[in-house]
Image: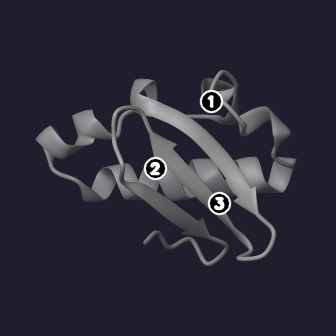
């Protein structure tokens, strides 16, 4: 997965290049941490929106049809 794969996700194009690269790096690791069934819930086509939180200095990542969302921080962690 590369930056170009996420261009259609709402909010992605508003991120800086550094924030986009952070998202791709953390998303790859996050997805790899799930089992096969859970990966389906969080795959690329399920991404709803990505926002940068200046206050928290991290990304907020949202998925379609889901109330769960994650922080992707600059250390490469998600929570």
- The part of the image, by quadrant, that contains residue 56 is bottom right
- The residue singled out by tag 3 in the image is 59
Q: Residue at x 63, y 45 (%)?
A: 50
User: Helix, strand or loop at disc 1?
Assistant: helix
Which colour scheme appears in the figure? one colour
- Answer with mark 3 or mark 1, whichever residue precedes in sequence: 1
**36 relative position to 61: left or right:** left
Q: Residue at x 72, y 37 (%)?
A: 11
User: Helix, strand or loop at disc 3?
Assistant: strand
Distance Cα–Cα, label 2 vs label 1: 12 Å
Say which of marks 3 and 1 sits in front: 3
Q: Position of residue 51 (x, y in %)?
A: 69, 50
Q: Position of residue 61 (x, y in %)?
A: 54, 51
Say which of marks 2 and 1 sits in front: 1
Distance Cα–Cα, label 3 vs label 1: 14 Å
- The residue singled out by tag 2 in the image is 28
The answer to the question of whether label 2 and label 1 lie on touching residues, with beta carbons closer than 8 A, is no
Q: For the residue carrying disc 2, how many other residues have a C-alpha within 10 Å: few (<14), some (14-19), or many (20+)?
A: few
- The residue singled out by tag 1 in the image is 6
- Work out whether residue 13 or residue 27 is closer to the camera in this orientation and state it: 13
Whether residue 27 is situated above or below residue 8 in the rendered picture: below
Q: Which mark is residue 24?
A: none
């Amino acid at each position: 997965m590369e930056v170009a794969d996420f261009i259609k996700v709402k909010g992605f194009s508003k991120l800086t290049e550094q924030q986009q690269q952070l998202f791709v790096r953390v998303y790859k690791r996050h997805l790899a941490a799930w089992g096969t069934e859970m990966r389906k819930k969080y795959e690329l086509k399920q991404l709803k929106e990505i926002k940068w939180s200046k206050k928290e200095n991290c990304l907020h990542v949202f998925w379609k049809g889901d109330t769960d969302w994650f922080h992707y921080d600059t250390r490469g962690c998600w929570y």
